[in-house]
Image (spheres, rainbow, N blue to C red):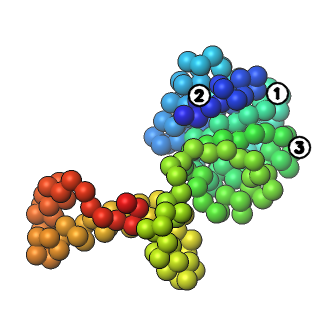
Amino acid sequence: VAGGYIAANFKDAKVAVVHDKTPYGQGLADETKKAMNAAGVTEVMYEGVNIGDKDFSALVTKMKDAGVTFVYWGGLHTEAGLLMRQAADQGVKLQFMSGDGIVSNELSSIAGPAVEGTLMTFVPDRRKKPAAAALVEKFRAAGFEPEAYTLYSYAALQIVAAAANKVGKSDDAQAVAAAIKASGAWATTIG
């Protein structure tokens, strides 16, 4: 989706594809690059950084020298936020895009104003589903924002609990797994 979006909306941009060298981050970057290239857009840079890196000044300088205007990031919010902030601090104006790895309120805490305008791909926000309203309010009342995969994880536990109850509150993992597989649908907070 991201590769096609970049090709359709930023075909004249000088694109850098940057990832965190993890199976998730590099995999996301590589698939986006593949789709973008297939749609006729070729990146001017393809770089990997290490998880835990804090100083991206050399990378930002390299982007500046290459005239990069658009960065597709494959990785998590921690390094993405630092990269955004450091680029802005060096006066480099970049449009950022990433996937679900940046879905965290911490991104804006790290990146500051540089986060504004960031694009991302993710499924629809399940917090907005009427079936999730009561649970979302419980989380918020406890001081926790159920962002990203919180409601998906909660739904998975709802399914495990329902299946365990179905087989007599069993702690037999095989019986619970069989019950999960035997049912075609489970009612959860996300549907």
Which amino acid is tagged 2? Gly
Q: Residues within 10 Å of mark 2 (few under 14, many from 20)?
A: many
Which amino acid is tagged 3? Gly
The front one of 50 and 37 is 37
Q: Which mark is residue 4?
A: 2
Is 148 placed above or below 97 here?
below
Which amino acid is tagged 1? Gly
SS state under label 1: loop
Of the two numbered discs 2 and 3 on the same chain, state the one appearing first in sequence. Answer: 2
Q: Which mark is residue 91?
A: 3
Residue drawn 55% across and 18% down?
Answer: 38
Split into 4 quadrants, where in the image is the C terminus? bottom left
Residue 161 appears in the figure:
yes
Rendering quarter of residue 152: bottom left
In this rendering, the label closer to the viewer, 2 or 1? 2
Q: How far, Cα to Cα, is label 2 from label 1?
A: 22 Å
Of the two numbered discs 1 and 3 on the same chain, state the one appearing first in sequence. Answer: 1
For mark 1, what is the residue?
67
Split into 4 quadrants, where in the image is the N terminus? top right
Of the two numbered discs 2 and 1 on the same chain, state the one appearing first in sequence. Answer: 2
Residue 166 on image: x %, y %: 14, 70
Q: How many marks?
A: 3
SS state under label 3: loop
Rendering quarter of residue 11: top right
